[in-house]
Image: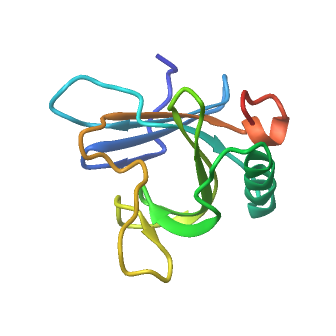
Amino acid sequence: MFATEPAKRKPGYANFAIADPPLKLVLFEAAEGGTINHLGVETETAAQVEAAESRLSGTGLETSGIDDTICCYATKVETWVTDPDGAKWEWYVKTGDADQLTNQVIGEAETATCCAPEAETVAVGTASAESSGSGCCG
């Protein structure tokens, strides 16, 4: 659809970083048809994640707080919020690559909820929306 090869491919997982139009598209393989897992706003700095979390929580939306995590084959600084319509949003900056799909907050032994699928199948997110100031909800 976008004439772009995956930037990262693992079993059951493909991550596309599309330049034009700016789009981050993550696909999870599943036996059933696809659904939207969550929407993501990829920022360029942790300070932008912190600013988004502050702005979102300041409007009365409950966020997950800010965590350093390992998820979806990457290390990240991230915050999560569920919008009034029930859609999950992730604001994050990728800080490195990792070898695991499941989410783990760095410094904690347990895994947490993220985009790694159980029954969900497709995650769709936008790239650079936070830094360009043109993101919906961002």
Query: Which is nearer the eye, 59 or 19?
Result: 59
| In-front residue for pair 31/1 | 31
Describe the colour scheme in one phrase: rainbow
Image-quadrant location for residue 77: bottom right
Q: Position of residue 56 (x, y in %)?
A: 74, 46
Which quadrant of the rendered structure holds the C terminus?
A: top right
Q: Position of residue 91 (x, y in %)?
A: 64, 48
Q: Position of residue 92 (x, y in %)?
A: 63, 53
Quarter location, residue 61: top right
Q: Which residue lies most toward the right here?
A: 133
For the point 15% across and 31% down, the residue is 31
Query: Who's the residue at 41% across and 48% down the image?
Result: 115
Q: Quadrant of residue 94?
A: bottom right
Q: How many marks?
A: 0
Residue under the point 23% across and 22% down: 33
Residue 16 relative to residue 57: left or right:
left
Toward the top, the furthest residue is: 1
Taking the spot 62% from the left edge, 56% from the top edge, the residue there is 79
Which residue is more in the foreground, 45 or 112? 112
Query: Is residue 118 rendered to the left or right of residue 94?
Result: left
The single residue placed furthest to the left in the displayed view is: 31
Asked whether, in this view, residue 14 is left or right of residue 31, the answer is right
Residue 105: percent from left, percent from top:
48, 71
